[in-house]
Every structure is written in structure tokens, then in C-alpha cells.
Amino acid sequence: MGHINCGTISRFLSTLFVVLSCICRFSLGTELSFVTCGSVIKLLNVKHNVRLHSHDVRYGSGSGQQSVTGVTAVEDSNSYWSIRGTRDAMCHRGTPVKCGQAIRLTHVNTGRNLHSHYFSSPLSSNQEVSAFGEEGEGDHLDEWTVHCSGSVWKREEAIRLRHKATDVLLSVTGEQYGRPIHGQMEVHGMSSPSQHSLWKAMEGIFMKPSEMPAGGQDYSHTHTEF
């Protein structure tokens, strides 16, 4: 019998949970007006109508890390991201994400975190955005601050995500890749706010505050929330 990769199984089960939840429990959290910790969501760039996406395809330049792109497809399972706390600040499942709060966004299918650093992006030469880490654990460059207008991140609101360490905003300006990810748009970091850096929470599973496990345990550092 061949060796069974536990990480592969974990990611498969995570994806299966998302799919089954969307089919069988589509109403979960739909009445919530705000985005909560532990939720698994898709993020739409409002200007370019693409969803934040990743996959096991590495950049051919720059860091060589896993690429992050924008896709027009609504149903692609590689566009799901889990909202988690940082290494220093817990994000209790079901609690509203506050404006100004630092979070990590973990790509469900690969277990890597949305990440940025001082490498140039391949198409526009802005700051590269990648996916980094293993099983949800990377480093301090995985942290993003939510910029919104009120006290909490409202689902109908277009927000910005600012990279905590380098101060750039998660952005899309329309550059498109060729093969092997033809038609997907480059996602990068830009220093100035604009229409290109506005994002909105779309499809997903939004955890309710009442669904926090008994005793108030925090699962933001594990994959049990899937």
C-alpha cells in the first residue's frame, strides 16, 4: 500500500465540507449582515468583477511561491478563503471581524495564506501577492488589516485589505496571464487606495456567533473550522 499524505486528505475533506455545506446548508449564516471569524468566503474585486483565487501553480519569477490571481468564474472551488486570526491575536469563530482588525486569509484547497513581500509582480511590476505556508501556518507577512467604514465588516460593504508589514493594498488592475492560467488576472499590492483595491464578501459559509464551540474555544489556528 502506498503512503497516504495526511495533508492531501485534510485539504480534500476541507473542500468536501465546503461543497456539502453549500448544497445541504446553503442558508447557514445568510441572515447575518456582517462577516465573521471562521467563515469560508469568496472575495470579489468590485472594479474588475473577479474573485480572489489561488491554485498549486507557482510564479515563474519573483518569489517562486504559489500564485494568487483573479478569476471571473463564480463556481470555482479554488476561490474559497478561510478568515482566521493572526499568530498573536485570536479570532474566535463566529465573532464579527472589526474594522481595523488584522486577519489571515487561508486558501482552503491548499492550506496556504494570502501573503505579500518586496518582490515585483510578474505583469505590472507592482508588489507581488502570493500564497505561503503549510497547513495554514506561515509568517508575519500573512497578515492583512481590514479597512471598512464602520465598527465591523459588513457583508454588503466594499472594503480594502492592507498588508500589515508593507502597507500595500490588495489590488487588481486588469493585467491578464497567458498559459498555463490563461485569462486569469494578476493580483498585486499597490500603495495608494483606488477603485482597483475594493473587495466585497460574496459566496460562502458565514459562521454565526451562536455556533462558537462550548467553552469559547478558539480554532483559528487549526483546520477544525472546516
Image (cartoon, rainbow, N blue to C red):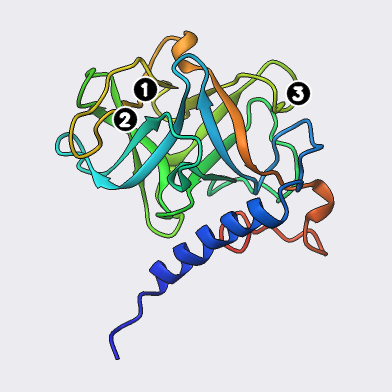
Q: Which residue is mark 2?
A: 184
Identify the secondary structure beneath mark 1: strand
Identify the secondary structure beneath mark 3: loop
Q: Amino acid at mark 1?
A: Gly
Q: Amino acid at mark 2?
A: Gln
> Quick one: 2 or 162, which is closer to the camera?
2
Q: Residues within 10 Å of mark 2 (few under 14, many from 20)?
A: many
Query: Residue 133 at what x, y percent from top left?
Result: 37, 52
Q: Earlier in the sequence, mark 2 or mark 3?
A: 3
Query: Residue 178 at what x, y percent from top left?
Result: 19, 30
Q: Quadrant of residue 64?
A: top left
Q: Which residue is mark 1?
A: 189
Q: Earlier in the sequence, mark 1 or mark 3?
A: 3
Q: Amino acid at mark 3?
A: Ser
> Which residue is drawn at the image coordinates 73% and 27% (left, top)?
152
Q: Which residue is mark 3?
A: 151
Q: Nearer the viewer, mark 2 or mark 3?
A: 2
